[in-house]
Image (cartoon, rainbow, N blue to C red):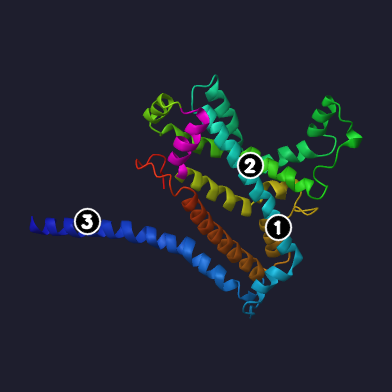
Amino acid sequence: MKKILINMRYSKWLVISAFITIPLLLLFTFTYLPFGEMVSYSFYKMKYIGERTFVGLKNYKDLFTRDDIFNSLKISLYYMAGSVVQLVFALLLATLLSFKTKLGNLFKGILFFPFLINGIAIGFIFKFFFTHGFVLDTVLGWIGFPLESLPYWLKTQGLNNVSLVGTSIWRYLGQNMVLFIGAIMSVDAELYEAAELDGASKVQQFFHIILPSIKTIVTLNIILSITGSLSAFEPPFVITKGANGTGTFFIIMDQVAHTSQKVGLASAMAVFLLLIIFIVTIIQKLVLKYAFRNADTGNGKGDII
């Protein structure tokens, strides 16, 4: 009997050790080890095969001297501006659909549906949508715009990036909206009743009840949208392949890594992008902490992180 109890005790510690060490080992092997290797690659001039030459910080200096890489960072500003528009519309729609609205569930489903579509498929959809003489131009022709007066949506510099940002907004608007709706639905209904008794308008209720109560989900959505805008890839890659000044940072990184086979430079770009996202996230946290400094509701509603 004593031997059985000793074996059970050893078996228990063996299972506990396995549940602790195996996930940590997998996390280290498939996450931190590849990341560490990528950081080390960024200090070398190298291809996928062949010899490596240590070049120190030269790859990082090239990030600021190569026009294609530096311009791709400027293009990210289009996507950042688009993410702001996307969040504003998502919050507006979420506020409207959180209360009793006719066909509200239908509108929620319609708006969320694009998020379920694969990014490559969205790229093909909008490639034909924006191609000159196709869907968008046909619709504008019905309204009265002659085809000859319409621009080339994917060739005109500046306008093509706006068109591509529009596809991003179309895809992620529903996701942001659903997150906002979940947070708004968690706000205590008694707060609205008390505000109405005090004569508060709907706008006042939004700014003094809803917005402070969902401040954490607002922060989360902003972080997700901004980081997503810095790593835009699928739609611009499928629609334009980065031509005519539409190459985002990820597209240029893909060309550097796979077309030019400059693995060291591509690794430096990846590390640099991670640092940018890290810095932007810290700035967002500080700015939003200051903006909502007087918005503590004290009940923790809307806090999911």
Is 290 situated above or below 266?
A: above
Residue 117 image point, x, y percent: 61, 37
Residue that carries the numbered disc 1 in the rendered image: 74
Q: Which residues are magenta?
A: 200-215
Residue beneath the point at 69% across and 50% down: 78
Locate the N terminus by quadrant: bottom left
Q: Earlier in the sequence, mark 2 or mark 1?
A: 1
Mark 1 closeness class: few <14, some 14–19, many ≥20 residues within 10 Å: few
Residue that carries the numbered disc 3 in the rendered image: 12
Q: Amino acid at mark 2?
A: Val
Q: Is residue 116 left or right of residue 300?
A: right
Q: Earlier in the sequence, mark 1 or mark 3?
A: 3
Is 286 situated above or below 214?
A: below
Q: Amino acid at mark 1?
A: Lys
Mark 3 closeness class: few <14, some 14–19, many ≥20 residues within 10 Å: few
Q: Quadrant of residue 87?
A: top right
Residue beneath the point at 61% across and 45% down: 84
